[in-house]
Amino acid sequence: MVTMAVQIAGSPDGVPLRIQLQRIERRRKLRAFTLVLPLLLFILIAFILPIGRMMFNAIHDDTLRTLMPRTTAALSSWDGKDLPDESVYAALAGDLKQAWAQKTTGAIGKRMNYELPGLGSQVTSSARRANTLSVGPYKAALIEINPFWGQHGVWSLLKRGSSRYTAYYLLRSLDYQYGPDSQIVSSPPESAIFRDMFLRTLGISIGVTAATLLLGFPVAYLLATLPPKYSNLLMIMVVLPFWTSLLVRTTAWVVLLQQHGVVNEMLIALNIISEPAQLIFNRVGTVVAMTHIQLPFTLLPIYSVMKTISPSHVRAARSLGAGPFYAFWKVYFPQTLPGIAAGCLLTFILCLGYYITPALVGGANDQMVGYFVAHYTNEELNWGMASALGAILLTATLLLYYVFNKLVGVDRIKMG
């Protein structure tokens, strides 16, 4: 009776007060969700869907299945040991005739050329000559037209093409490939370039991150301790590069570091060197230009944390007998670790995807993952390889972020 009276007293319309509060909370959450819905849609359309499509393209390729349906269907019963029988060659002849009529031989040859270089033009010539075949036997005729139709590796490739999904692009991005019997083997040394490229990307990113930390930490400390009228002016100088295009900043370093540029002329005038040094189109130019561009991204998070540290902490340590360096190292520096972690992580992740700067100031041995993604996208039109390289880079970035969070994450830093 008492509970009922309380419910009636708290709800003139007969609805319990608890139910009314739940409705109000649901309306509040719905209103908040409605406000953030445009942003969620933007993230979904501009980021999640393209990234998902990229990941999908890394393992999906139905070119051969679509353009050579008879051959791929006939190969479903092939045991993969000897060459296929006459019926499979007859299906191949039919697909080649259809491809010649529909002008799709170029797409077939291009796809086969990815795995077996040199097949592109041969597929086109085979289709042209197969178009004149009217009756069998097709096996001997096609091998006579082009002997590569008698190679076991070609038929293994076509059998793998009967599936909509392939691991070829991911394997190739890690310097592996399929052998003649569809076994996974290492790529030849002359084409095994991707593992070195990933290691190079990782090494350059770590080097640039370390350089920005060494240069940015003292400047952040100076910004945090100077009077406002001086720190504001210095802050303008720090963020000034954000007002300039990335391309312009990179091109400026080309002018500064070239053989007869400002830096070399100054070093010669100071008698530091006797002849111009090679400062561009190598690793030096790449690291210097990337460090200049990334410096604010490391500095600003460190500065934001330093501004929250009370000067009284160091003064208290000094009053208890600690020296200047000991007080800084034991009291002040540990409190800056969250800013250091955030700034270094941001810079490192941004460096992994660099393309323009290494392409302009770096040499042939300084190109990073972004260069090869652009190359396969814009020049070779090989979306599978571009997607595979991007997918591996994204996966590696997420794994590194996870490991970083576990080892030196902000929560762990605060607990320490």
Image (tube, rainbow, N blue to C red):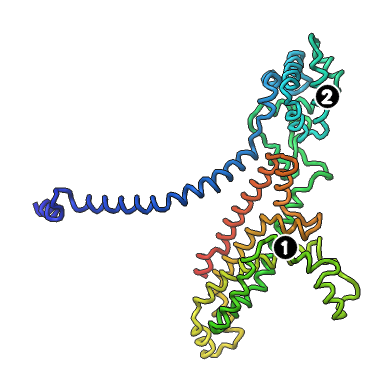
State left or right for residue 351 relative to residue 46: right
**Is 33 placed above or below 185 here?**
below
Q: Counting other residues with Cα less than 10 Å from the Cα at mark 2, is it few (<14), some (14-19), or many (20 or more)?
A: some
Q: Quadrant of residue 131?
A: top right
Taking the view exactly as shown, the residue that stands out farthest to the top is 135
Q: Residues within 10 Å of mark 1 (few under 14, many from 20)?
A: many
How many numbered marks are there? Answer: 2
Which amino acid, mark 1? Thr
Q: Select label 1 or label 2 by which is in front.
A: 1
Cα–Cα span, label 1 and label 2: 47 Å
Mark 2 element type: helix
What residue is shown with label 2? 125
The secondary element bearing badge 1 is classed as: helix
Asked if residue 84 lies left or right of residue 328, the reply is right
Disc marking residue 39: none
Q: Say if 155 sits above or below 354 in the image.
A: above
Q: Residue at x 81, y 44 (%)?
A: 191
Q: Which residue is identified by label 1?
A: 250
Question: Is residue 38 found left or right of 251 in the rendered image?
Answer: left
The front one of 61 and 332 is 61
Q: Residue at x 65, y 50 (%)?
A: 393
Upstream in the sequence, badge 1 or badge 2?
A: 2
Residue at 67% over, 65% down: 293
Residue 226, x across and y down, in percent: 57, 83
Residue 163 against residue 315 in the figure, above or below: above
